[in-house]
Image: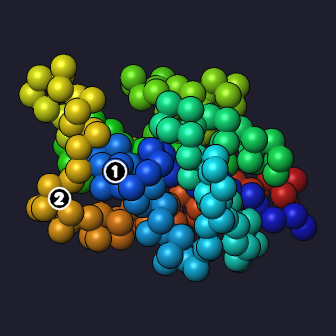
Amino acid sequence: MANLKLMIVGLGNPGQKYEKNRHNIGFLVLDNLAKDWGVDLNHSSKEEKGKIDKDGVSYYFLKPLEYMNLSGRAVSELSRKNGIPPENILVIHDEVDFPFSKLKFKQSGGNGGHNGIKDISEKLGSPDFFRLRFGVGKPGDSALTAGHVLSNFNQEEMSKLPELFGQAKQKIQDWVRERQIIFSKASDK
């Protein structure tokens, strides 16, 4: 029997100056999960990726490194190369429409103005992937949104991140279990 293949993608911008930006929460969550699961991420100029097989699941970890707005190429290439359909892809990204620390799943739908999600939908040819939306809040004036997401988390927010990484990990494990059930039922037919 073939393994279930799942891809977990963290969105962010490459480079040290962006490391602790709100826009990089996808990278931060993915790095934390990879460390926890013992996944080594191999670095190239265009991406960081790694793979682990456990409990009948092949997990592909991916951090596109061509800046947020160009994330789709790396996602679509890894998806095609390994035969991973959109519904088995989970993208972790910042969400300005949620207050800091709110985590919520979404499958399919629009991009909500998030250019990384827009590029992934276009390059995959489908919006049917899952998203783990991580609330980073937004400033009162919408004209300040770009500066807000490209600013670092404040000290209080940084102190809460480890707990939020734990919550994100639990949500990811719940998603994995759901995908395993669907895969098992499809395999039984």
Front one among 40 and 96 = 40
Q: How many marks?
A: 2
Coordinates of residue 112 in the picture (x, y in percent)? 39, 25
Q: Is residue 111 above or below residue 39?
A: above
Q: Is residue 182 above or below residue 39?
A: above
Residue at 49 percent of width and 61 percent of height:
30
Q: Is residue 108 above or below residue 47?
A: above
- Dot 1 falls on a residue whose secondary structure is helix
Residue at 85 percent of width and 59 percent of height:
188
Residue at 23 percent of width and 33 percent of height:
147
What is the three-letter code of the residue carrying label 1?
Lys
Examine the rendering and report whether any part of residue 25 can be seen: no
Residue furthest to the right in view is 1
Q: Residues within 10 Å of mark 2 (few under 14, many from 20)?
A: some
Residue 39 occupies quadrant: bottom right
The residue pinned by badge 1 equals 17
Front one among 121 and 15 = 15
Residue furthest to the top in view is 143
The residue pinned by badge 2 equals 157
Disc 1 and disc 2 in contact, CB within 8 angstroms: no
What is the three-letter code of the residue carrying label 2?
Glu
Coordinates of residue 149 in the picture (x, y in percent)? 27, 38
Q: CA distance from mark 1 to mark 2?
A: 18 Å
